Image: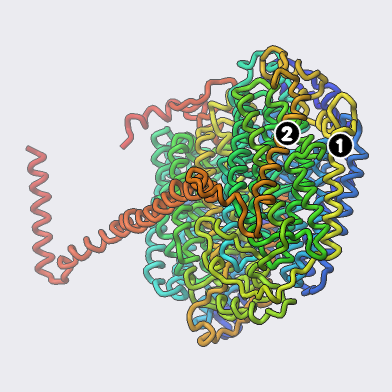
Amino acid sequence: MQTTTPQLAETIGALGLGAADTGAAFEVATGPAWAMLIPMLPLLGAAIMGVCAIMGVRSKLPAWITVGLLGFSAVLAAAMYAWLPENGRAVSVAWEWINVSWGDEPGQTLKANFGFYIDSLTCLWMLFVTLLATLIALYASEYMSHDLGAGYCRFFAAFNLFVFSMACLVMGDNLLLLFLGWEGVGLCSYLLIGYHYKKHSAVFAAKKAFIVNRIGDLGLLLGVFLTFVHFGTLEYKDLFPMVQPYIEAMRQGSISDIPALVQLIPVLLMIGAFGKSAQLPLFVWLPDAMEGPTPVSALIHAATMVTAGVYLIARMYPLFLVSEWALPIVAWVGGLTALVAATIAMAQFDIKRIMAYSTVSQLGFMFCGLAFLSSVGGAFHVVTHAFFKATLFLCCGAVMHGFAGQLDLRKLSGVSFMKGWGIVGIAMLIGCLNLAGFPFTAGYFSKDMILAEAFITPGPGYQFLGVILLLTAGITAYYTFRVFFRVFVGPKHFEPGDELHGHDGHTDDHHEEHGSSSHGANSDHADENGHTPGDHEPLGGSVEERGKKSHADPEHFHPHAPGWAINGVLVTLAILSVLAAALYFFPGADKAHKGWAGGMISGSTAALVVGGEADHPTRLAAFVGAEPEQGTLFGQDPHKIMYYVSGVIGFVGIAIAFALHYAGRKESERSSADNLLQVKPIRTAHRWANAKWYVDELYDFTLRKPLWAASQIFHLIDKLLIDGLVNLVGYLPRALGKGVRPSQSGVLHGYAAAMAGGLAVILLIVLLLSL
Amino acid sequence: MSESILHVLILLPIATAAFIVSRPANEAKTVALWGSLISLVLGVVAAFQFDWSNAGAMQPEVSLVPWLPALGLSISVGADGVSMMLVLLTLLLGPICVAASFSSIKHRVKTYYAWLTVMQAAMVGVFIARDILLFYVCFEFTLIPMFVLISIYGSSNRKAAATKFFLYTFTGSILALAGLIYVIWFNATRVPVEAFAGAGEWSFQIDTLRQAAVRMSPTEQGWVFAALLLGFAVKVPLFPVHTWLPLAHTEAPTAGSVILAGVLLKLGTYGLYRFAIPFTPIAAVDFAPFIGVLAVIGIVFAGLICWVQDDVKKLVAYSSVSHLGFCVLGLFALNTMGQSGSVMYMINHGLSTGALFLLIGMVYERYHTRSMRELGGLAAKMPVWSFFMVFFVMASVGLPGLNGFISEFMCLMGTFQSSDTLAGSSIGATPGVLGPVFAILAGTGVVIGAMYLLMMTGKMVWGPLREPKGHDHDNHSELPDDLNAREIAVLTPLAVLCLVLGLFPTPVLKGIEAPVNDTVRWVHEHGGLRLYRDPAPARVTELSPAGVVTPELAAPRAGGER
């Protein structure tokens, strides 16, 4: 057992808030060495994939190795959870990563180990990350099977590397290792979005994701700087005890004792969170990220990576608590993102993009949960969302896989009733019910926890925000079931997409077309299996795919139903999505906290009161400075009434979707919703929402284009002005030489004359001076 | 570490060059490769002999080969942790540059390899010189081989590029020389003999002169600093004296670009680190915000220029200007974090940008174009090349886990910390004159870096394959479509080092920490910056603390200065 050092206590004293209690609450044990295997196994996997690629493996071997290693990681994550002592924290250090020291005093050494911090928050995240990664790798083994060979290895290498990075992000025992994971998942996201690298739109989307994330990362990096500058450490085990005095100050209501710098740290950190979790104003990359293969969308862009922002805030919760403005900003950004993304989702036709916007929207809910002082609600929603959203994405992926890349909900109908598609239909229904917040599903409970807090927690406009979120919940139910009613039930009909796999006998056709666009290069992994994003191209995206007419003959096209791997994973995930609801009732580590997630959170740094116990009203009073009075909704306790309110709202959303898109749909393409579009205001709103409120265009015109113009101008300045001056300076001596050259004529009397003249001048000067 | 091994490191390349000249042309590349490999091995031996626990001190302790004792001239060599690292970088790039030239250099082979090898002697000489004479001779001598390499083996506009490179950097160096001579003169004539060993005589020893130089008045320091800055800034190159670089880089042969980016630019930052800052600490502190502004402008300005380039080699060349901005910023943070980061940056930039130039050279050999309009989507045809390209781009972007991140992070962190205002209240801050604003502005360079490097990757690596028209018809190259074994062997050590330095930088960091700590302490002590955690008021702008400049020395100069 390693306890806090005297040096640390001294440092805390130096912060000027009196000696703090650095006793038992902050003990950090030495973690087990095998916990380090959780990130290291996927890293090993990535290396093995590289070897496979070099050796030219053309079988499914890479997938099986990946599934095995990730499965082992998942088992270890479960073991880590079992190992975890109550309220325990432990650190396992693999090796010293960065260590720069310029003195012996506190704050004069920057140390960041490759060390892993194990507490219940880590366990919570790692459990679902490794479990989902294993399942989705299994799914991908079938999904990616058309690309066996180098592409397959490349896919699984990035997949493994992603899990490694995510594990570093979640398990890192310092902010710098978190940052390594943070950027590492960004890299993998870049590589996997751009998997179909011959498609302009995929390359563009990948670049956009990386750069937009980088903007957020800069905020995070500055937050890291400020954290170090103020606290003199980046390691959690030293950092959190040092925040404790500020928490005490907050409790006593003396917020003025907390330096502005400390209050600024969470604001910088949250910029990073907004980037990674695709919140306003940095959400634009996530929908485009759907260019990646669907398993990637499910794992990275729905279930795990995008929750990194939620994790960051949960991990750094003590710092967010001691800032006056941090959590309200998070609340408003989250709430507005939830609404905006939901409205866009209503007007899209590409089912995968609808799910992408839905992810953005649900992440907004999670941020709100954190901001409403319900880190439990936020974290629980992360877990339930991870399972049901992965289910939804993988169902969409199965459809896409089976229908040659078709994702347009107007061109698919009644899929559930087709032969071999029953499992997909049922899994989709379970996912949709969860997302819509249908009573007694996991999504219903986790969303309620957040919604209720909106009406309880005092804060700037939180009540209004609660109304926005309720409205969003209704919209969510509508757009979710719009997809379900149009694609999965109703009359059987389909038009295949324009990407046919080899087994349909169109191989030559297909390759010929690609051959022409790629100068006859080998199109081993031409962009099969990408998809056509219909009418929502990203700015600058390619036009060429759009106009490409399907050369699939619908007469001869047979959708191929998913095989055992896809179906098996869907069944497992659907069951897990349902079972997740039980976590709400499962008492977890201690009974005082709501459900299993509550137990997990209360034992970690994300707990509202670090190292202590407090009941709800008091902790509110402690952190918001308000009287411990319970907010109400319709004059009732929001916790209780919310079950009914949100249940009703969910029903209403589903009912509208049913009326418009099931009952009101006679043929596959048109529904009575289209009649509504004849009404002008609705049509305009629809057009704007379909164009994503023109945010991309706004950025293009206000940022990208001016910056591009400025760069061109800079280039000119550099070439003409700066280099021009240099050339001028270089030219002067030459010109001078040219001017003087006639005098060096070698003619003797010339020299004599010059000498005489010079002598005369000197004499003249001497004469004048002596006067 | 023995003195002789350092002497051998300078002499061996010269001997190799002589041997190359004496042998037939077809043996030149083999001889050059073996010579540079032996140098590298010797360098590694030297690194093992080096006492890393005492990396802050010059090793060997005493090194003096008298040359013209009457004038105080001697040859004196030694290395501390920083020098050792840079010597190793130079020696590593040696065989890589030789091997990278095998297929591209077809005519005047002997001249090429001879100069390439001589170049190495000069660069090593700069880093291990302990007296100004050796330093300056080597510093200037590097120009000649590079001039030859560019003007004979470069591409179409090579003559102009070589001339500009030579004249521009030469003019700068003259100014630096003037500054150094002033310090020598000052030591000989203005410092009392009893002040310290070597005072009051004509000494060229850097250690001696450093002690003398800090006794100069702030005004003198200002002038000397300005002279040194001008000389070294051209070499770095710091905005706005950078315009020779894109031209020289674009026209130089691949190995020339690698050496230019990998080592020659580092001579400038090394000069700033070794001379400008410790010799004239008061001026360095005074000028730091000004240089910080130039560095930040360079980072953003050059970064944005990269974004609109079509010539991929020019893009990487401009990216060097942007990257070296971080390096200079770190130096003038005047704290351990920033300066260690800066030294790390010198090494890392040499590895990753050197590798990018190699990669571009490999494509150029196959396609004879560097235009991203004509060329692109090479992942389809050159998967191995593409792997390395993406890898080194990520190292260059500063992806954590690879080397670039460590140095970029440290430079920015050092800049952020370096604030007298923050140092009063925050335990992690250090005295200094830059601070968060500089770090935030420079931080935008991180985003811009991602913009232009990914733009380049997006065009060169991804997308549908684009080749110059008629490429297949006139491709007489003996090279295969993708990289051959030699090319992979050239890139692999760099890639491995990028990864190792990204994941286990501690050995290197610890090696440079001690000397940097010494320099930083020296600067803080003599530069009027508040000592660490010293309760004394933040800055003394006027005359330095007691005992540093004696009044009787300062007084006559105040009046007698010309």
Kindly state the secondary structure of the residue where label 2 is placed: helix
| Chain letter for mark 1 | A
Per the image, the residue denoted by label 1 is A583
Residue B222 image offset from top left, x and y in percent: 41, 38
Mark 1 residue type: Leu
- Residue B391 in view of the camera: yes
Q: Is residue B241 above or below residue A592?
A: below
Which one is in front, B367 or B107?
A: B367
The tag on residue B342 is none
Q: Above or below — where is B436 with respect to B426?
A: below
At horizontal 90% and vertical 27% (from top left) the residue drawn is A590
Q: CA distance from mark 2 to mark 1?
A: 23 Å
Q: Which mark is residue A648?
A: 2
Q: Is residue A25 above or below residue B370?
A: above
Q: Earlier in the sequence, mark 2 or mark 1?
A: 1
**Image quadrant occupied by the N terminus of chain A:** top right
Where, by quadrant of the figure, is residue A82 drawn?
top right
Q: Nearer the viewer, residue B28 or A410?
A: A410
Q: Chain of mark 2?
A: A
- Three-letter amino acid code at disc 2? Val
Q: Quadrant of residue B499?
A: bottom right
Q: Quadrant of the C terminus of chain A?
A: top left
Q: Check whether the beta carbons of the residues at disc 2 and disc 1 lie within 8 A of each other.
A: no
